[in-house]
Structure formats: C-alpha cells, structure tokens
Amino acid sequence: SAYAPVPPIFAKMGLAYDDVLLLPNETDVIPSEVDTTTRLTREITMKVPVISAAMDTVTESDMAIAMARNGGIGVLHRNLSIDDQAAQVDVVKRSESGMITDPLTVNPEVSLADLDKLCGKFHISGLPVVDKENRLVGIITNRDMRFIPSDDYDRLKVKDVMTKDNLITGPANISKEDAHRLLAQHKVEKLPLIDESGKLAGLITVKDFVKTEQYPDATKDAQGRLRVAAGIGFLGDAWQRASALMEAGVDVLVVDTANGEARLALDMIRRLKSDSAFKDVQIIGGNIATRSGAQAMIDAGVDAVKIGVGPGSICTTRVVAGVGVPQLTAVYDAAQACKAAGIPCIADGGIHYSGDIAKALVAGADTVMLGGTLAGTEEAPGEKVLLHGKQYKLYRGMGSLGAMAPRGKKSYSKDRYSGRCHLKRKGGPEGVEGEVPYRGPLNAVLYQLIGGLHQSMFYVGAHNIGELHEKGRFIRITDAGLRESHPHDIVMTAEAPNYTGFHN
Ligand code: XMP
C-alpha cells in the first residue's frame, strides 16, 4: 500500500491545509446566495457545515445552543459526570421547541427561591403549575414575580403568587397558527395545552415563535427542538453514559477517542448500532486519519466518520508519539472510503482560517469541527482573563495534564488517550494548555467563518457544497507561496475581524 514500510524517501507525501490553495474558476455565483447545506450524518443535515469540538474549554450547553441556532451543532464534552452531561443535553433540548411535549412544571407548594433556581438553570421565564395528578392549577412567570422583593423568596410559595384565574389554554392537538392567534389575542407568552382528561399535555411559548424567525437556519429535530451531540468513550461506564444521554434526548453520540481504530472503540460502535434502544440516535466514530481507518469505522456501522490524528492546535500526539497524517491528506484519503460508502465525514482539527474550511470540504469533508477557533468566544466555558492588557480565555487539549488530572477533581477524559489503559505503564499527556484571545459572541465569529466560505464558493464557482466537492481543485504551494499568501511587508496597525495573524 501507499503506506508500506519503505525507506522514508519513498513514503507517501502528506499535505496540510497550508500546503495548498484553491484555484479560481469561471463563476456566476453570488456569495450571499450560496447554499451551504450539508450532511452531518446519514440522517441529519445542517445549513452550516460547522461543529464545535467536544472539549471542556469549548462546548457546554451555552455553546451547543448557540451553534445549533446558527445552523451548526455542538458536541458536549465528556469531562464531567454522567448526570451533569445528561443535564446539559436536557438544557439544550428544552431551550426552544415548536411544542414542548413534556414541559418542566412546578408544584404549588415549592418556594419562590427554588423556582428561581430552576428558571435560572433552564434559562426560562416561567412554568405551568400542576397538582399531583398533573392537572393545571396555575401559571407562574416573570410577570407574577416582578414586584416581589427577593428577600421574600424563601417565605413565599408558588401558590401565593401564581396566576390562577382565567388561564388561557389550548387543546393538545392545536395547530401552530391557532396557537399563535391565541397568544396574540390574549397578549400572553405561554400557552399550556390540556388533553381530554384535563391534564397538562404540552406548552407553546411565544419565545419559540420569535426564535424561529430570528434563527431561520437553526438545526432542529422533528419536534422543533435544537439538535445536540455529546461525546462518549468506550471504557468503564461508557455504556451507562450513552444510555443516560440517549434518555435525555441527545441526537448524536460521538464515540470520541484519540485512536478510533482501538478495537474496543469499534466494538462500542458496533454495540450501539445493533441495540434498538439507540435506533433514533446517530453515531459518529473517530478519530482516524487513513482510508483503512475510515473503512474500519464504516464496517462497524457509523453514521459519520471523524478525521484527524494530531492536527489540532493544542495537540502534541504527532511529537509525543510520532503518529499522525497531515490533515489535508488525511481528509482526502479517508473521504475516499466514505464517499464510496455514502457516509458523511468530518474534518476535525487544524482549521485556523475560514479558507481552511473550504479546503477541508474540497478535500472531501462534509463538515468541519473547530476547537481553538471557537474557544475564545463568549459561549465557550470559562471566564475571561486579562493578560498584558488584553482579554483571553483558557483553551486546553483534552489530553493535556490539566484536563486529564484536574486539581482536586475527577477526570472523565483520560481514557480518550488511553486505549492502552490496561497496560501498567500509562502514557504521558498528548496535549497542551494555553490561552486564546477573547473574540466576543459566537455568532460574530461564525459570521466571519461562513462569510469566508461563501467567498471560497464564489471563487470556485460552486452554488452548493456538492458543486464545491466537484469543482474544487488544489494547487500545491511552497514556503514562499505561503509567505506571499499572508500579509507581508507591512506592520499591521488595525485588526481585521477575519484574520488572526500568521499562526506559528
Ligand atoms: P483545533 O485545531 O480546532 O483542534 O483547536 C481541535 C481538535 O483537537 C483534538 N484534540 C486533541 N488532540 N491532544 C490531541 O492530540 C489533545 O489533547 C487534544 N484535545 C483535543 C480534537 O479532535 C479536537 O476536536
């Protein structure tokens, strides 16, 4: 094969994103009118081909919500307890909805203090109040609480302040249009739905109508809820974790390991795919970096393959283990197997600029996964820190010491790098920790990244991702070509919103 153990001089050449550029073509494409719809997995499409990485400094529920609203998706990291990760799935799934079929409710005897905590956790402004038989007895919203001093929250109960007279409700099978009409007519924000036996059967909120208009590209499930993915491992309590996430309503599970060809990882994928309990959950497998690696994933039954061994900005696998494939070649080779099988693939890691997204897609990827590029956004976990007068946020590899051995806390991410954990001698870290510049809200960062992709599609002459796959052609460049590509012979005095400098 091309990778046979021949003397290095004859070994296959591997290329990185920086080694190539895309060729301009004749075009009638208008950048703002391109269609970037793509396949995430066998059964899920997205309007924007971007995924946020399953890393503890990148994706928790805030990021996952923002990613799905903007047309992509987030993969919740797994460096936390099963309960906490499942609770984050719940937060995303409850963040917006066409009709909420199992709304959160509150008992009339609950204190206002506890109600306040619940509303804060789920970012909601009020709840239907039900008795023990799940019959609606009132509704409590911001409006009922507005004039109550917070000092009284411990003393007062929901039943003392809820609205209980003239409740506006609808039948369980109400249409979207009728629901909207009722909300508008009565100037209320929440419409509880009641079934024939008088029990609460659902909830429609005005917020969800507004969100649908505000985020027309959002990635949603059949019930109008935002989609969310979550990372799992394949050792220890991984099966329990997968089951808890599935029960919380996760759309996609990512069997997330540094070496997807670990036999136990492939076994985990096979087991998930053959268990009917998981039939509504799509399974992504990774990471691999060769055509045969992708084939192993496909043979195990995955719904999408994730590609990348060592390209990430915080990765040290390639230096610590001497293993990896430069990412453009990895994507190209792995995508050959995926294309033949009709399975989408994800280019994970090493994307620094918007131009790299188009390069990854032309090489054969259907979507890209970003870590460092999104770690500086407001929605990424963690606080901003001030360094030399500039704001930064923490970004670290999931194989870094900090993520694998957090001080005074249990690590749940160690096994990503320890398919070899049955051996007595454990390996060292395969990632580093650092800070990335604070970049403001995610939608501004995504706007620039996707704007760049629109420009690429204009130059290539591609109206959609299918045409980008077909028409995109690379030219290889030299170090001189790379230097020529970046700003040169100038001292930059103003920052550009879509250029973060020559990475090193
Ligand atoms: P970027 O370049 O977007 O890469 O920051 C994010 C991807 O890097 C992978 N990852 C790691 N790889 N050691 C590694 O070798 C690590 O500690 C590590 N942590 C994350 C992961 O695939 C992620 O999506």
Image (spheres, rainbow, N blue to C red):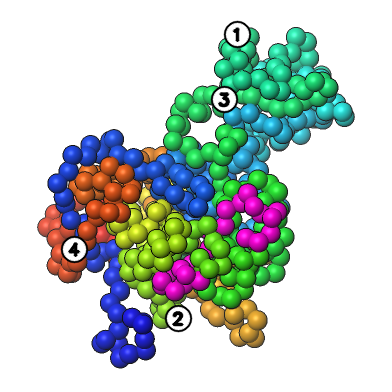
- Closer to viewer: mark 2 or mark 4: 4
Local crowd at mark 3 within 10 Å, few (<14), some, or many (≥20)?
A: some
Q: Is the C-beta separation of discs 1 and 4 under 8 Å?
A: no
The residue that disc 3 covers is 207
The amino acid type, in three-letter code, at marker 3 is Lys
Judge: label 1 CB < 8 Å from ligand 1. no
Local crowd at mark 4 within 10 Å, few (<14), some, or many (≥20)?
A: few
Relative height, residue 75 to residue 315 (above, below): above
Q: Element at badge 1?
A: helix
Ranked by sequence position, the earlier of labels 1 and 4 is 1
| Rendering coords of residue 461 (x, y %) | 21, 46
Ranked by sequence position, the earlier of labels 3 and 1 is 1
| Rendering coords of residue 203 (x, y %) | 68, 26
Q: Is residue 277 part of the magenta span, yes or no?
A: yes
The residue that disc 2 covers is 321
Ranked by sequence position, the earlier of labels 3 and 2 is 3
The residue that disc 1 covers is 185
Ranked by sequence position, the earlier of labels 2 and 4 is 2
| Rendering coords of residue 397 (x, y %) | 49, 65
Local crowd at mark 1 within 10 Å, few (<14), some, or many (≥20)?
A: few
| Rendering coords of residue 179 (x, y %) | 62, 17
Residue 155 appears in view: no
The residue that disc 4 covers is 475
Region rendered in magenta: 273-296
Q: Is the C-beta separation of discs 2 and 4 under 8 Å?
A: no
The amino acid type, in three-letter code, at marker 4 is Ile
Which residue is rendered at x = 26% and y = 86% of the image? Answer: 10
Q: Element at badge 2?
A: loop
The amino acid type, in three-letter code, at marker 2 is Ala
Q: How far apart are marks 2 and 4 (CA)?
A: 30 Å
